[in-house]
Image (cartoon, rainbow, N blue to C red):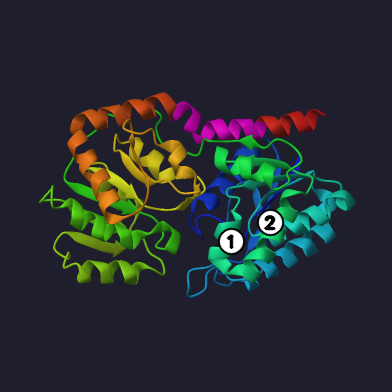
Amino acid sequence: MRIAIVYDCLFPWTVGGAERWERNVAEALVADGHEVTYLTRLQWDPGEPPQIPGVEVVAVSRAEPLYGPDGNRTIGEPLRFGWGVLNHLARHGGRYDVVHTASFPYFSLLAAGALRRIRRYRLITDWFEVWSDSYWREYLGPVQGFVARQIQGACARLRQEAFCTSRLHARRLREAGLRDEPTVLRGAWTGSTARPTPLAAEPHVVFAGRHIPEKHAPDVVPAVVAARKQIPDLRATIFGDGPQLGLVRDAITRHGAGAYISAPGFVEGDAVDRALERATCLLLPSTREGYGLVVVEAASMGVPSIVVAAPDNAATELVEEGVNGFVCADGAPATLAAAVVAAHEGGAALRESTADWFGAHAPELALDVSMRVIVARYRAAARA
């Protein structure tokens, strides 16, 4: 089959979970014998285009930043990318049997949906998240949030086959108007699926993620300060970069915690892994996660995770209370600190329990499982 993958980001020129997912989809389909074109925006030196075996990479929009100074997605880039997708599919859409697109940014999905019948291709969509009305209002304000909700709903109502990475967003997608039942693909883990042998823990809390408002990275600081009242030698490392990195460092200074809390910014994955494998816990006070792969990564080392119950947080689906971590009722410093203390007191038994959890669930959480489902869907379509 001839397939177009559509996403405005391409790994590793842009790094993130969705970027990795779409590239993995492209490579899995190539390995299964399909012809794949990847439509994206320019992210590289024009003189050094991507060389991905079996994948034709086409830039349909210019190079430009994804995020503004406030950490939010800009509006201009999605519009220009959507226009580029529309132009490409208007001219070349007839060559594709399937257009497989990320739902976000929505204008590219609307473009693909508008031309589906004219160019006679099937439309498959990866829905990593479906935002709630309240979150849209918080993110964009009442007027722009309302408009964005209508656009999201229009995308959901398009004739498409949908993949989701969590039960939360599959339910929301149905409620938003999806005509058919979405397929939930929980497998995104690319590492070993063997039960780990946990290393001995150090009194160390790790956060890893982009420093944007919904991740609540600055909240790690007062939580660790509070937890040190019961764990005097506790320290923390807050990995990642983003518009709130300055707020994180300000919080460290304000609490006088520079001797035991560090925020090194972006570091290579190996450095995060080395810190995480001996950490007391992963502390992820995020209130919005489409999946929460870092929770699986921690469990693969036998390290428990602390997450926060919130309407937009699908990472809670990956934590079994008291087995591989804790789900906090809120993100208040005292609440997070109590969970850190519980993880510390859980000691080796909690780490072994986390390792057992990973060993039991890894087969369904492996990326290969999701890719097999996707490839099988394409094979069935090719026979039809």
- Tag nearer the camera, 1 or 2: 1
Question: Looking at the rendering, in which quadrant would you find the C terminus?
Answer: top right
Is 53 a magenta residue? no
Q: Quadrant of residue 242?
A: bottom left
Looking at the picture, tell me which residue is in the foreground, 229 or 57: 229
Which residue bears the numbered disc 1? 136
Looking at the image, residue 369 lies above or below residue 261: above
Looking at the image, residue 213 lies above or below residue 198: below
The local secondary structure at tag 2 comes to helix
Residue under the image location 33 percent in, 44 percent down = 306
Looking at the picture, tell me which residue is in the foreground, 82 or 154: 154
**In this image, 41 relative to 345: left or right?**
right
Give the image location of residue 194, x and y in percent: 37, 27
The reply to whether the C-beta atoms of the residues labelled 1 and 2 are less than 8 Å apart is: yes
Give the image location of residue 118, x and y in percent: 89, 52
The local secondary structure at tag 1 comes to helix
Considering the whole magenta stretch, tell me its main secondary structure.
helix
What is the number of the mark on residue 152?
A: 2
Question: Looking at the rendering, in which quadrant would you find the N terminus?
Answer: top right
Amino acid type, label 1 = Trp
Magenta region: 362-375
Residue 73 visible: no
Q: CA distance from mark 1 to mark 2?
A: 10 Å
